[in-house]
C-alpha cells in the first residue's frame, strides 16, 4: 500500500512535483477549516477539520462528499490503511474508527482527555496517537484499547510516523524529535538544536524522512537519510507555518 500524506513542503521536496504542474484550488463544499488530509492513491482520499467535518473524494479531489462523523469537535488528523479501515483524532482526546470507508464512525475508548493531533497505524492492530502535554497513546488491538506511553516531555506533540512495528519518530514543539526502537516502550529525545515548532513528519522508506515546521518567521525542513540518526535543516524565507 502506498501511503500519501499531502503537506505542502513534503509534496514539493519529497515527491519532486514539477513546477509546471502547479497548484490550483478545489471546491471543498464546506466553509469549515480543514486540517487532516490523507490519500491512499492519486484518486481516493479524505480530509477532516472543524465542527466534525469529514470529506471524501474518489476522483483526486474534483468532487468532495461529506461523511457523518457524529461529532462537532475539531477533527485534527486522519489515516486510512485501505479503502475501508481508518481512524480520526480530535480535540478533547477522542479517537474514532471506520470499517466501511467512512460511512460510519465508531468512537473508541482512548481513556484520554488531552487534545490529539495525529494518528499512525503500521497495520490493522498496532497504532499510536500523539497530542497535547507530551501525550502518546498506543494500541495493539486496532484501537479497542489505548494505553499511555511515557514521552518524557510535557510539550505538544504534533506528528508521529513509524518505519516498522518497532522503530518510530514523533515531532513537536521546541524542535523535539522523539525516537523509539521498541514500539514506544522507551522514547529518546533526539538533539536538533532548533527551538521551533515541528508540525509534520513523514518517512518514505527505512532511512529517508522529512519533518517540517516554523518559528513564526521562517519555515524549516529537516531531512534524514540515515534512519533518523542525524537530521539536516533547511530554512525557507516565509512566515506561514506548513
Image: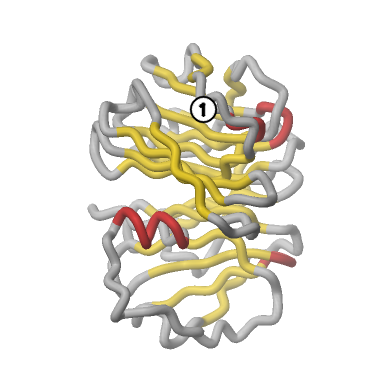
Q: How many marks?
A: 1
Q: Quadrant of residue 38?
A: bottom left
For residue 200, side relative to residue 57 (left or right): right
Q: Quadrant of the C terminus?
A: bottom right
Where residue 153 sits, quadrant-wise, is top right
Q: Position of residue 50 (x, y in %)?
A: 71, 66
The structure residue drawn at horizontal position 53% and vertical position 41%, both measured from the top left corner, is 159
Q: Look at 59% across and 59% down and name the residue there.
A: 238
Identify which residue is drawn at 66% across, 44% down.
Answer: 215
224 or 86: nearer the viewer: 224
- Say left or right for 209 vs 117: left
Q: Residue at the location (55% across, 24% down)?
A: 193
Q: Position of residue 26 (x, y in %)?
A: 49, 85
Tell me which colouring the rendered structure shows.
secondary structure
- Mark 1 is surrounded, within 10 Å at the Cα level, by few (under 14), some (14 to 19) or many (20 or more) other residues, namely many
Residue 231 located left or right of residue 194:
left
The answer to whether residue 162 is above or below residue 191 is: below
> Image height check: is 89 above or below 67?
above
Q: Is residue 166 above or below residue 216?
A: above
Using the image as rendered, state which of residue 68 and residue 81 is in the foreground. Answer: 81
Percent position of residue 121, x then y: 41, 40
Which residue is under mark 1?
A: 177
- Name the secondary structure under disc 1: strand
Amino acid at each position: 500500500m502506498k501511503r500519501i500524506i499531502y503537506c505542502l513542503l513534503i509534496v514539493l521536496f519529497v515527491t519532486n512535483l514539477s513546477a509546471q504542474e502547479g497548484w490550483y484550488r478545489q471546491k471543498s463544499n464546506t466553509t469549515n477549516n480543514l486540517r487532516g488530509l490523507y490519500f491512499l492513491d492519486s484518486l481516493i482520499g479524505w480530509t477532516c477539520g472543524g465542527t466534525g467535518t469529514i470529506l471524501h473524494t474518489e476522483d483526486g479531489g474534483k468532487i468532495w462528499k461529506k461523511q457523518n462523523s457524529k461529532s462537532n469537535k475539531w477533527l485534527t488528523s486522519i489515516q486510512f490503511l485501505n479503502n475501508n479501515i481508518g481512524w480520526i483524532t480530535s480535540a478533547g482526546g477522542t479517537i474514532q474508527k471506520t470499517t466501511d470507508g467512512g460511512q460510519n464512525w465508531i468512537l473508541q475508548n482512548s481513556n484520554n482527555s488531552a487534545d490529539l493531533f495525529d494518528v499512525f497505524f503500521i497495520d490493522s492492530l498496532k497504532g499510536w496517537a500523539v497530542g497535547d502535554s507530551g501525550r502518546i497513546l498506543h494500541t495493539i488491538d486496532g484501537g479497542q484499547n489505548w494505553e499511555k506511553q511515557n514521552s518524557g516531555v510535557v510539550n505538544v506533540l504534533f506528528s508521529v510516523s513509524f518505519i516498522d512495528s518497532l522503530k518510530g519518530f514523533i515531532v513537536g514543539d521546541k524542535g523535539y524529535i522523539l525516537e523509539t526502537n521498541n514500539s514506544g516502550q522507551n522514547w529518546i529525545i533526539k538533539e536538533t538544536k532548533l527551538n521551533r515548532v515541528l508540525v509534520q513528519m513523514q518517512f518514505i522508506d527505512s532511512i529517508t524522512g522529512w519533518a517540517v515546521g516554523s518559528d513564526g518567521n521562517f519555515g524549516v525542513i529537516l531531512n534524514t537519510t540515515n534512519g533518523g540518526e542525524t537530521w539536516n535543516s533547511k530554512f525557507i524565507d516565509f512566515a506561514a507555518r506548513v
